[in-house]
Image (cartoon, rainbow, N blue to C red):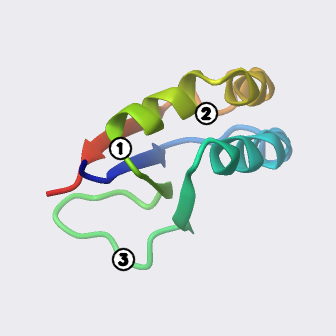
């Protein structure tokens, strides 16, 4: 079974304190579901029209594990704290080759 990667990007963050509160719950929730945070923060560089937005990459053992993490009660509780702080957020789950 191929590994999977959860890639989240944030175009806008309207309340950094609320994002931090979300992160305090989201990080442990994703790790409890088998996720391994590989990278998080602002890009070191952007190329070909990229934007300087917060990016998070989490590795899972499978697409199913990544989806289960997103749908877990613990992560859904963290999402409540996020609210509309990051309206322009994009999460993609991609399977490794």
Say whether disc 1 or disc 2 marks the residue closer to the N-terminus: 1
Dot 2 alpha-carbon crowd within 10 angstroms: few under 14, some 14 to 19, many 20 or more: some
Q: Which residue is mark 3?
A: 45
Residue 39 in picture, x, y percent from top left: 51, 68
5 and 42: which one is in front? 5
Decide: is 49 above or below 28. Answer: below
Q: CA distance from mark 1 to mark 2?
A: 26 Å
Q: Residue at x 66, y 51 (%)?
A: 31
10 and 75: which one is in front? 75
85 and 69: which one is in front? 69
Say whether disc 2 or disc 3 marks the residue closer to the N-terminus: 3
For discs 1 and 2, the disc positioned in front in the rendered view: 1
Q: Secondary structure at mark 2?
A: loop
Q: Secondary structure at mark 1?
A: loop
Query: Does residue 31 appear to the left or right of 22 in the view shown?
Result: left
Q: Residue at x 62, y 41 (%)?
A: 33
Q: Which residue is mark 1?
A: 62
Residue 86, disc: 2
Q: CA distance from mark 2 to mark 3?
A: 21 Å
Dot 1 alpha-carbon crowd within 10 angstroms: few under 14, some 14 to 19, many 20 or more: many
Residue 88 in picture, x, y percent from top left: 49, 31
């Amino acid at each position: 079974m191929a590994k999977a990667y959860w890639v989240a990007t944030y175009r806008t963050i309207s309340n950094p304190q609320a994002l931090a509160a979300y992160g305090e719950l989201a990080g442990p929730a994703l790790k409890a579901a088998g996720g391994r945070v590989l990278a998080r923060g602002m890009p070191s560089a952007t190329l070909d029209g990229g934007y300087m937005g917060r990016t998070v990459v989490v590795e899972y053992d499978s697409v199913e594990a990544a989806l289960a993490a997103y749908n877990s009660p613990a992560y859904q509780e963290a999402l409540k704290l996020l609210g509309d702080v990051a309206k322009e957020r994009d999460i993609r789950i991609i399977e490794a080759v």
